[in-house]
Image (cartoon, grey):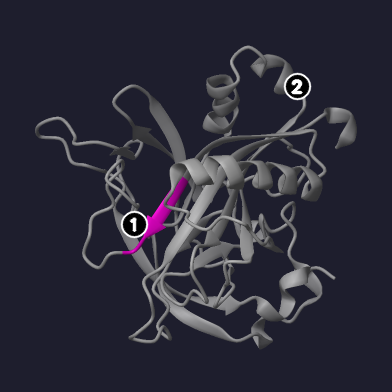
Amino acid sequence: MGLQETRIESLPFVTAELNYLAPTAGKPRTYAFDPPAGEPKSTSLPEPHQVPIFDARLIANNFSLDREGFALVRHPTQVKDFYDEAEVRALYYPAVEAFLRATLKADRVVIFDHTVRKRVEGAADIRDGGPRQPATRVHVDQTAVSGANRVREHLPDEAEELLKGRVQVINLWRPIRGPLRDSPLAMADGTTVAPGDLVASDLIYPNRRGETYSVKYNPDHRWFYFPEMTPDEALLLKCYDSATDGRTRFGPHTAFVDPTTPDDAAPRESIEVRTLVFTNSNNL
């Protein structure tokens, strides 16, 4: 049964503030390092909106990565210390690759990076400065352009052949400690997101330029979260899909402040692994 047969309005929900993209002149851009003198760090300014975010626990099995753009999965792990880079690469990477190959019926999975986050009250989100902070703006990690460019960047010798088949960028996100009550992740139902809601935005690094989608507010958006996630659970988030046959190609998401979070809740700690998922065209 899909969401279209579910009475969404009957689900529990919280009302929370999500940071959409404020109208801006020109293409939004953000520097991933200290900007040149006189330049703002970012021209992607937030436009907060209060929206209902539905508790998806009761209908968890109804979500489809291809339809809504996200899914909750059970994924136990043997990793003891996610802050240990060597352990993550030696134990977690192979487990994630095998899990995604089996779950998504993929021919090949290539992990291209991971990010560990820990919320520190009042801290800025600084790259290469230890654990990152939760991302508190509505966004998609890739765009139609940058999703394909990820293949060219990480697999240059095979890229053009691989791009003839279906390519997805899938983010596997999980809490490191749980149950997670602080800064949970909200996901938009991709079937409620119009193409015009997605605004390509430059992410400027010292040696390259990436591109993500910022998201304009649309009252039609429908938001979900899975409260109190445990370390044995994970979210699959679709960040790009080359398929153009009606599936959801891009899944907006954001961390948010849950107004029901207890004052003594432990700060959110999480890890996300970003992957290229390849499926030959004859297996679509």
What residue sits 73% from the left and 76% below the top? 59
In front of the other: label 2 or label 1?
1
Q: Give neighbour class at mark 1: few <14, some 14-19, many 20+ (Cα, 10 Å).
A: many
Q: Earlier in the sequence, mark 2 or mark 1?
A: 1
User: Total marks drawn?
Assistant: 2
> What kind of residue is marked 1?
Gln
| Residue 31 as seen in the image, left or right of residue 105 | left
Query: Callout 2: helix, strand or loop?
Result: loop
Query: Callout 1: helix, strand or loop?
Result: loop
What residue sits 55% from the left and 77% below the top? 227
The numbered mark at residue 47 is none
Nearer to the camera, 196 or 174? 174
- Residue denoted by label 1: 133
Would you say the magenta stretch is mainly helix, strand or loop?
A: strand
- Residue denoted by label 2: 164
The stretch of residues the image draws in magenta is 115-119
Q: Residue furthest right?
A: 282
Identify whether 95 is placed above or below 280. below
Within the magenta stretch, is there residue 198? no
- Asked whether residue 135 is in view, the answer is no
Identify whether 98 is placed above or below 82. above
Disc 2/disc 1 C-alpha distance (Å): 36 Å
What residue sits 77% from the left and 70% below the top? 61
